[in-house]
Image: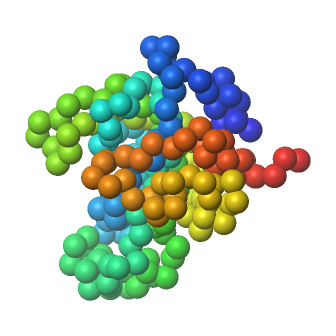
Amino acid sequence: MRLFSFWRSTRHTTSAGAPKRYWLFYAGPENYLFEGGACDLPRETFWSCERETKRGDLILVYRKSMDQLSVSYLVRQFGMSEDVAKRLKKTRIGKDFPVIWEATSDAKRTMFWHWTYGCNTKEVQRINPPLLLEALKAKQQLKKWEGLRWNLQARGRSALEIPEFAWNSINNLIQGPAS
């Protein structure tokens, strides 16, 4: 309920008075795996974003799938033991949404990173258990969200904008049925 109140109070404008936008940011396995298995995403961080990202925008973070990664790749790439890698492959980590961030800065041009723009973010809600991609795809109201129909492909962008109707529908999934 705390997050729903937060969303309602900040729903339409950013701190600068600009219309609030909602974004989907991506976290690849390199962002959530380490030698011990999986870890939480950082509570505050600088992350790739789009030029239009403004302070106060809300961000749903999508952990990309690790389905294509073999046990031997996990061992090699992340220094995991084979046992840890095998256990990790049996989990449902990836293709999910574990956290909501808020942009704490406007987008900044980056010169020495692998992306063009980045912004500071902070966690406003941990989603536990993480919301699964298949739950979004099963929700009738989200079928008209083009980004979801494209399987969350940003097509050359580092983030995907989420329309307000989709954000509200996702919020309902996170909050669960009204009591």
Name the foreground residue: 57 vs 155.
155
Describe residue 108's horizontal placement relative to residue 92 as left or right.
left
Describe residue 157's horizontal placement relative to residue 173 as left or right.
left
Q: Residue furthest right?
A: 179
- Name the image quarter holding residue 142: bottom right
Name the foreground residue: 151 vs 41.
151
Q: Is residue 46 visible?
A: no
- Above or below residue 157? Residue 7 is above
- Above or below residue 137? Residue 112 is above
**Residue at horizontal 41%, vertical 47%?**
160
- Give percent across and percent down for residue 168: 66, 42
Q: Is residue 94 visible?
A: yes
**Residue at horizontal 32%, vertical 79%?**
69
- Name the image quarter holding residue 76: bottom left
Describe residue 129's horizontal placement relative to residue 81 as left or right.
right
Name the foreground residue: 165 vs 71.
165
Question: Which of the image's four quarters has the N terminus?
Answer: top right
**Residue at horizontal 34%, vertical 64%?**
29
- Above or below residue 60? Residue 96 is below
Q: Residue furthest top?
A: 17
- Give percent across and percent down for residue 19: 51, 23
